[in-house]
Image: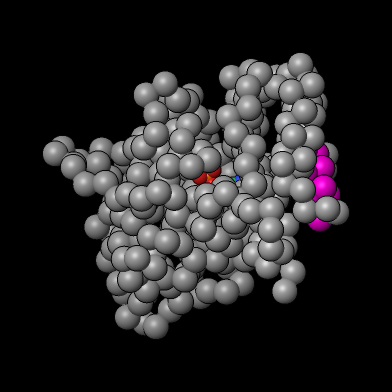
């Protein structure tokens, strides 16, 4: 595995690889790698000749009061894990090179970035789209892999790729979970012991809502029951949202009709840690 920090060098390498006709698979990450990242790498590795990943804690996607500074970082550990996962190139650019003096451009995917996490993290998805587009231009992958855990990010990235006519296929990877159901996340290390013990409740509440939707299609009841489960837990400090939406458009899901997939997604706070998760109810034709 080769680690690259220079943008120009990364560009040169990927241009050459493309010239040789190699298929490049790409997994963008913010590092502190875990099983969720590794499962995307495994999938990408199987479908490509060259596996590229990036590790870049993107300052542009953090709000002023968010955890950019304390976001967990461990490049040595990440390098070992990436090597083990068959990564060919690890791109780890310095922040000052990605956003040099005078940097002005941001990419915005309108409307989709105003709901769910976008509503509670203003500017977050502009930051995500900007860095993802930059990384796409540097790495020039044929396929890029994103986790369903960050469902809104996946949908917004797909929209950007389609709207801007990028020749990149976006491929989704299933959410990887701990044995007790908690979605694996770099931020889980923030959780104190009792918070960690109670954190699987988020997934349980999503499953409960899904069960009700599948049983009687009562979306309001599903939301109410799930919200109550969360409110009843003393470790849930705040619920940012618990939404049922059309899984493609992210418009609020309607009680009528069973054709479209429904996304059930939530963000909650346990102490100072924000947890997100989601589940899909498949539509019936
Ligand atoms: P991050 O490093 O948190 O920006 O995540 C990098 C990529 O890994 C994103 O596409 C995430 O959606 C994906 N990812 C994070 N956690 C998981 C998980 N538990 N299961 C599957 N993919 C994940």
Q: Residue furthest right?
A: 215
Q: Residue furthest bottom?
A: 21
Magenta span includes 210: yes
Q: Which residues are magenta?
A: 204-214
Q: Residue furthest front?
A: 256
Relative depth, front residue between 82 and 234:
234
Magenta span includes 62: no
User: Residue drawn at (73%, 57%), measured in percent from left and top?
Assistant: 281
Left or right placement of residue 37 versus residue 30 in this view: right
Left or right placement of residue 45 versus residue 128 in this view: right
Relative depth, front residue between 43 and 269:
269
Residue 259 image offset from top left, x and y in percent: 68, 67
Relative depth, front residue between 21 and 281:
281
Left or right placement of residue 46 versus residue 177 in this view: left
User: Residue drawn at (77%, 28%), measured in percent from left and top?
Assistant: 228
> Main structural element of the magenta stretch: helix, strand or loop?
helix
Residue 39 image offset from top left, x and y in percent: 65, 57
Task: Quadrant for residue 121, please give it.
Answer: top left
Residue 191 image offset from top left, x and y in percent: 67, 24
Task: Quadrant for residue 7, please give it.
Answer: bottom left
């Amino acid at each position: 595995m080769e680690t690259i920090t220079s943008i120009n060098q990364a560009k040169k390498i990927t241009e050459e690889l493309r010239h040789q006709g190699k298929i490049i698979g790409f997994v963008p990450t913010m590092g502190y790698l875990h099983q969720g990242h590794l499962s995307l790498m495994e999938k990408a590795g199987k479908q490509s000749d060259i596996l590229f990943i990036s590790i870049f804690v993107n300052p542009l996607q953090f709000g002023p009061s968010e955890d950019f500074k304390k976001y967990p970082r461990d490049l040595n550990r990440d390098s070992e894990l990436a090597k083990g996962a068959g990564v060919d190139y690890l791109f780890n650019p310095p922040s000052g090179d990605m956003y040099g003096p005078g940097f002005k451009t941001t990419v915005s995917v309108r409307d989709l970035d105003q709901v769910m996490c976008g509503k509670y993290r203003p500017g977050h998805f502009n930051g995500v789209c900007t860095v993802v587009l930059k990384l796409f231009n540097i790495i020039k992958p044929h396929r890029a892999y994103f986790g369903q855990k960050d469902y809104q990010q996946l949908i917004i990235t797909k929209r950007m790729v389609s709207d801007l006519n990028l020749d990149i296929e976006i491929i989704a990877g299933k959410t990887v979970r701990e044995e007790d159901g908690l979605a694996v996340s770099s931020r889980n290390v923030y959780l104190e012991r009792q918070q960690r013990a109670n954190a699987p409740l988020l997934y349980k509440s999503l499953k409960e809502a899904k069960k009700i939707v599948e049983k009687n299609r009562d979306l309001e009841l599903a939301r109410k029951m799930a919200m109550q489960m969360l409110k009843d837990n003393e470790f849930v400090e705040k619920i940012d949202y618990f939404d049922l939406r059309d899984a493609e458009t992210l418009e609020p899901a309607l009680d009528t009709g069973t054709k479209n997939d429904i996304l059930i997604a939530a963000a909650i706070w346990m102490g100072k840690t924000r947890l997100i998760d989601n589940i899909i109810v498949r539509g019936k034709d």
